[in-house]
Amino acid sequence: MASKLINITAVTTVLSQPSPTYALVVDSTSGIVVNDYISDNEGGVYHITIISDATNLTAIDDTDITPEGVPVIGVGSCFTPTNALKLSQAPFNTPGWGEIARRDMRAIDAGANSSTRSATSASITYYVDPAGSDVTGSGSITLPFRSIQYALDSIPKRVRHIVNIKVSAGTYNGFTLNGFVFDPIIPGSATGISILGTWVNFAPATGAATGTLSSVAAGTSNPVTWAVLTDAGQTWTTDNLKGKFINILTGTSAGTILPIASNTATNLAVISSSALGSIGGTYAIIDSASIVNTPVEVPNSLPAVQGTPTIAAAHATINVYGNIGSAVNNSLIRFEALKTAAAAFYGFFTEGNQAITIARCQITGAVTGSGLSMLGPGRTTLTQSIVNLTTGSGTSIAAAAGATQTSVISTLTTCTTGGIGNNAITVGSISGPFSSTTLVQVQIDSHLVGILSAGNVAISLSSVRISGAGGQLIKADPAHNAQAQTIIVVASGLDLSNSGASTAVQLGGPQAFLTCVVSASTGTITGSGNSIAFAVEQGARVQVSAASTITGTTEILLDSMPHTLAEMRAQSPKVLNNLSYFSCVFE
């Protein structure tokens, strides 16, 4: 019997047991019990086969289809199609989890051979469009689905090939990507799921979205400057293009898409510390037209990154968790050219052992938790993207509570006027395992704290510019680093300029250490407008390079005692220390 899709809105009865989740679904119209896949909250994937009739279910046979092939003991129960939604046992005791359970399901008739859907047999491309349908659509380019979630639910849970979901311009509900096992047929071959949005030309307030470059100036990594592209014929409004993207269409660097850090009437500062573009090359200012603006619930069995929100507040626009994959096998979950714009606790929420790339995306909206929240273990790369939170009280990017590997590359993190006054990037966990964060070609604007270490983290900075609004640009305080280690390595240029006249670097605690790579003076710290350049206390250590020229009203505050860089450099050896705490600044 061929599979027949059932409208997901007609599935009204979900009966569930906690950890792992066993569930059956009853179609409220026909009364037929339908088969499905369901995942537990640890990444296991199960197929549920109903072996009794719809009115008196006496047994459920659960067969594990994860790569290990370990059988799972069935659950015997007696249910009827008229049962209401039963989610009474912790941790699945909220309507929020019921909604997620429904979204995880891809229902088919009980007579169909569901085992044929256990794994991909070839590469898949699905299309999603606002004019599509989750009832009559097939996911083809001519009959697209309506929702991103339905396209995800149409993918077998064992992914052995490349799966692309191409999203047309339009506005979409949030979605959850979970329960997938990335298992390539040939070890080391590529497999994964990519959700790809659509670009459109941005409409500037003045001037045009397209043009021809009249001059170009390369960026530099040490000190940090961004590439500047000039179109003498433009009349743009200053910074109207900040937070958009430039697409180099022809000439040198054709095909490159990067964030715009700022603009004048004729110049674009693009986040690149190298050569970009060529005279006579053409370009377009672009924006993502695939907007995700309705959040979905985050399972309340998962920890929160920022505080402990109520279940009503714990929601994300894009929710990724419980997937099994390995970077060794080139497994990848990729998002590109999407814009999150919802009022949510999280913009992106990711958790678990997976390799995730968020490329050329825009994370916006009123976020009260984190724009991008990452819980380990796992590896997440945010590249060529923009995080621009407008209101709320959250952190732009947070990586915590696990052995996370985080890379932020060619990215702008900013706040608009009236935006949040919190942290741009929070990394590490005082009680969690050691993690690492790498920032390369990153600009951080207008946050109270630029980079905050919560301990047990190594941070590498290369071509990073941080400008503040009155707080600390880099902070690792004694409350965290008396017990947990923070290592900050300045591998190339780091520019710290604070318009609010506060502290550039505040390090405290015996396990806090900042060092500049001194080979060929590659690691240098520059900047101005700071009240204090380096505040070092309670055993922290800072090593600066000879080429570092950062300034402050007070250049060094060593356990509350003011000093200058020149005073440190006049010593032999070049070191200032406090023997009571063993705090020191040296070259």
Image: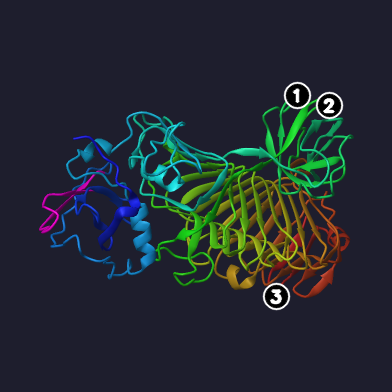
Q: Is residue 119 magenta?
A: no
Does residue 517 sit above or below 500 in this rendering? above
Q: Quadrant of residue 346?
A: bottom right
In terms of secondary structure, where does tag 2 sit? Answer: loop
From the top left corner, tell me how far across and down residue 31 is, in percent.
19, 54
Inter-mark Cα distance, 3 to 2 = 59 Å
Q: Amino acid at mark 3?
A: Ser
Q: Are marks 2 and 1 in contact (CB under 8 Å)?
A: yes
Which image quarter is the N terminus in?
top left
Amino acid type, mark 2 = Ile
- Find residue 541 and report its image quarter: bottom right
User: Label for residue 50?
Assistant: none
Name the residue beneath numbered marker 1: 251
* Marker disc for residue 279: 2
| Mark 3 secondary-structure assignment | loop
Q: Is residue 523 visible?
A: yes
- Disc 3 residue crowd, few under 14, some 14–19, many 20+, Cα 10 Å: few
Residue 551 shown left or right of residue 36 in the figure: right
Q: Quadrant of the C terminus?
A: bottom right
The magenta span reads: 47-65
Determine whether the residue tagged by mark 1 lies in a helix, strand or loop: loop
Which residue was labeled with disc 3? 580
In-front residue for pair 138/333: 138
Does residue 354 show up? no
Q: Nearer the viewer, mark 3 or mark 2?
A: 2
Q: State the CA–CA distance, disc 1 to disc 3.
A: 60 Å
| Mark with earlier residue (3, 2) | 2
User: Which color scheme did the rendering employ for the protein?
Assistant: rainbow
Q: Give above or below for 492 relative to 319.
A: above
* 571 or 32, nearer to the observer: 32
Position of 258 with respect to 457 (left or right) is right
Disc 1 residue crowd, few under 14, some 14–19, many 20+, Cα 10 Å: some
